[in-house]
Image (spheres, grey):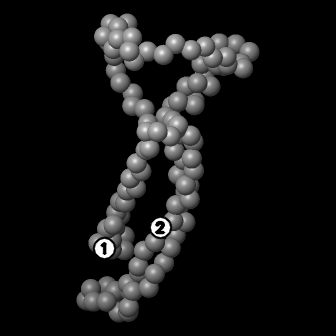
Amino acid sequence: PAETIKYGETGSCFTLLQRNDGVPIETSEFTCMLHFNVVQVDPSTGEEESDAFEEEYPLEDLEISTADFMAKVSVLDFRKSWETVGNSNEVLEKYALQFKDLESAVSSVINLLG
């Protein structure tokens, strides 16, 4: 947490989530609330005029999906890179997408994965 953020200044806060490798990735949504203490300060002297009191402010919900666990990587020669990984990391399965044409299927997959 930030020690202090004065009026008119900005600050940052971060949330760290740990992924459990044994559990499949599912889209999850979290409600976010900013909790903070307010202290009134005399602008001319900078001295505190009152005791601190707690406040809270609702933030936008946070959604975590499969795409948040993937990083875009630039690969010059995909086939060569794929072959260096080896067969031990390869899984071959068939899936069916319920789309009328290839273009809408590709668009949907890109939207889902980011």
Image coordinates of residue 113 in percent, x first then y, are: 53, 30
Which residue is at a point 41% across and 79% down the rendered structure image? 37
Residue wearing tag 1:
4
Location of residue 102 with respect to 12 vertically, above or below = above
Q: Is residue 28 left or right of residue 79?
A: right
Per the image, the residue denoted by label 2 is 34
Amino acid on which disc 2 is placed: Leu
- Picture residue at 57% right of the left edge, 42% below the top: 27
Q: Is residue 51 above or below residue 9?
A: below
Q: Earlier in the sequence, mark 1 or mark 2?
A: 1
Residue 16 seen by the camera:
yes
Q: Secondary structure at mark 2?
A: strand
In the figure, residue 6 lies in which quadrant? bottom left
Q: How many marks?
A: 2
Image-based side of 100 in relation to 93, left or right: right
Relative to 56, does residue 30 appear above or below in the rendering? above
- Residue type for callout 1: Thr
Q: Is residue 9 left or right of residue 111?
A: left
Local crowd size for mark 1, using a 10 Å CA cut-off: few (<14), some (14–19), many (≥20): few
Which of the two marks, 1 or 2, is nearer to us in this view? 2
* SS state under label 1: loop
Query: Gap between marks 1 and 2, in whole Å?
Result: 14 Å
Q: Are marks 1 and 2 in contact (CB under 8 Å)?
A: no
Tell me where residue 51 sits by quadrant: bottom left
Q: Quadrant of the N terminus?
A: bottom left
What residue is rendered at 58% in x and 24% in y?
A: 109
* Location of residue 112 with respect to 9 vertically, above or below: above
Q: What residue sits 55% from the left and 66% below the top?
A: 58
Residues packed near mark 2 inside 10 Å, few (<14), some (14 to 19) or many (20 plus) = few
Residue 108: x percent and y percent? 62, 25
Measured as percent of width and height from the top left, residue 88 is found at 38, 15
